Image (spheres, rainbow, N blue to C red):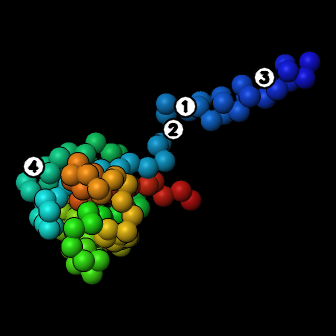
């Protein structure tokens, strides 16, 4: 009986955690823009991909937008902090050109301080040179 109760509780918990109605709005949407070393330029191909992504999200213009900017660990911390800020500003310009309002945007410039990928490898450095644009529905 005890094992059956534990099994029932586990099944109920996993159903609550895994079961999601397809009609529910996702908690967030994320898009990453990648940069060359030392660059904050967003090329036309990535701009087009960003705009197509935004077009696919219903109500994107009314969502909270978080911009998280990252760099690899090449260069000084001060330089990477500046580069991270410039990458955020480039992303904001692209979002505003698409018609999104700046007052809906927040920025976190991480520079080299919050790498997701391993900065000791070339591939990790490439993946850390990015801005993540995160859209969250506003819940009232």
Q: Residues within 10 Å of mark 1 (few under 14, many from 20)?
A: few
Q: Residue furthest bottom?
A: 78
Q: How many marks?
A: 4
- The mark closer to the camera, 4 or 1, is 4
Residue 6, quarter of picture: top right
User: What residue is disc 2 on?
Assistant: 24
Helix, strand or loop at mark 1: loop
Q: Quadrant of the N terminus?
A: top right
Label 2–label 1 contact, CB within 8 A: yes
> Dot 3 surroundings within 10 Å: few (below 14), some, or many (20 or more)?
few
Q: CA distance from mark 4 to mark 1?
A: 34 Å
Q: CA distance from mark 4 to mark 3?
A: 51 Å
- Number of the front mark, 4 or 3: 3
Q: Which residue is mark 1?
A: 21
Residue positioned most to the left:
44
Is 128 above or below relative to 90?
Answer: above
Q: Residue at x 25, y 74 (%)?
A: 80
Q: Which residue is mark 4?
A: 45
Q: Taking 8 as reference, is 39 left or right?
A: left
- Residue 75 appears at what percent x and percent y? 21, 73
């Amino acid at each position: 009986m005890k094992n059956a109760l534990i099994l029932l509780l586990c099944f109920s918990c996993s159903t609550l955690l895994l079961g999601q109605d397809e009609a529910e709005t996702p908690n967030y949407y994320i898009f990453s823009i990648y940069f060359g070393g030392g660059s904050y330029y967003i090329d036309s191909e990535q701009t087009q991909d960003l705009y197509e992504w935004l077009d696919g999200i219903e109500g994107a213009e009314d969502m909270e937008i978080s911009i998280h900017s990252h760099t690899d660990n090449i260069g000084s911390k001060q330089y990477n902090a500046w580069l991270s800020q410039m990458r955020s500003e480039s992303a904001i310009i692209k979002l505003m050109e698409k018609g999104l309002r700046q007052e809906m945007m927040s920025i976190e410039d991480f520079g080299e301080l919050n790498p997701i990928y391993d900065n000791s490898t070339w591939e990790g450095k490439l993946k850390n040179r990015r801005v993540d644009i995160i859209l969250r529905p506003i819940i009232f």
